[in-house]
Image: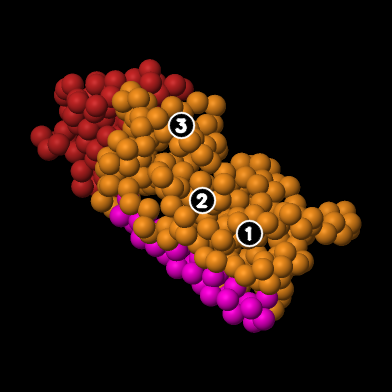
Chain colours: A orange, B red
Amino acid sequence: MAGRAVRFHLQTQGGVAMAPVPSHSIDMLIRKLESIARLSDEEKNAIGHLPVTVRPLNAGQDIVREKDRPSQCCLLLEGWACRYQILGEGKRQIFSFHIPGDIPDLQSLHLKVMDHSVCTQSQATVAFIPHEALLELTATFPGIAAILWRDTLVDGAVFREWMTGIGRRTALQAVAHLFCELYVKLEAVGLARDHAYRLPLTQADLGDALGLSNVHVNRVLKELRGKGWITLHGGRLEINDWRELAHLCDFDPTYLHLERRAA
Amino acid sequence: MSLHLQPVPIATDSNDAESQLVFADGFLVAMLVRLSDDHGDEAGMWFLEAGFGRVDDPSQPKFADLDEAQEWIQRRLDGG
């Protein structure tokens, strides 16, 4: 994980102000929000005019850290991120994985102190949106405020599923469920199709997310491969038998509350 | 308190089939599994498949050899 100073480095570099973001960058946010709700043209236009600062980040770099008091939110444009917390003896719990279009620290808009950290899982491009601009946007467009609220409620629904996974699913079911969930989320924002996607996660990441040892993750992946249900190679996951995989873990995407469902 | 090992095959649904039951004064306190070649760099290490009572640890540590594993288990039993 990168040091605490990173957050400040992200905002300016060598005293040079960041270039204004091309409007298409924030399209990722519009695409994400449209996956869970309908946006009017006026609302899309307002989102498109948010002042953002775009930064490329390396993998494993902290975007915001526990105890920070952020003045901006981070919109993921490219790459993956995760929310996490470090426990004693260097143990780590990952709370969620994030894909382009997500704002993993949206809560900082209303909860002033971060109670966890967010870091990149892969090389990433992020857009920082000042809190002030988001507050103004949500005050002017209550419909957007409602959609962001909806997004946090979906977030809560995903946490509930993860609790079930950590507490009540077998290791095999927990990994299968996560693979199904990630596919449906990626597919909803146009970043996956044909039941395949880039998965920039290590076995340790999967273990830290699901409360499993990397030994168990390794065994499970071998078993899923052995059954022929998945192919995992070079950071790319192919789900060869969606029906079997989804059946194994009773995957039901209702909790993702998507406007359009994956097949 | 003295530790006693008893080798036993284990069905983990994987190639990790070699294990040792660890007893302390006749009580089962842990089960160690030798990691197979499926585990790359960690092949040959001993994995705490299960620990009971003070030896229970959700982080399920791995040890370079059985001596290291027994030292760790003993420390746990001693309250360390």
Give the residue at mark 1. A29
The chain holding disc 2 is A
The chain holding disc 1 is A
Are callouts 2 and 1 both on one chain?
A: yes
Note whether residue A201 is visible.
no
Residue A191, above or below A115: above
For residue A78, side relative to residue B29 (left or right): right
Instruction: Give residue A140's position: percent from left, percent from top.
Output: 67, 81
Give the residue at x 20% y 31%.
B22
Residue A169, above or below A22: above
Nearer-N-terminus badge (2/1)? 1
Nearer-N-terminus badge (1/3)? 1
The chain holding disc 3 is A
- Front disc: 2 or 1: 2
Q: Quadrant of the N terminus of chain B?
A: top left
CA–CA distance between discs 2 and 1? 12 Å
The residue segment tinted magenta is A137-165
CA–CA distance between discs 2 and 3? 17 Å
Give the residue at mark 3. A238
Give the residue at mark 2. A188
Secondary structure beneath dot 1 equals helix
Q: Does the magenta portion include B29?
A: no
Secondary structure beneath dot 2 equals helix
Give the residue at x 26% y 51%.
A168
Name the residue furthest left. Answer: B26
> Mainly helix, strand or loop, the magenta region?
helix
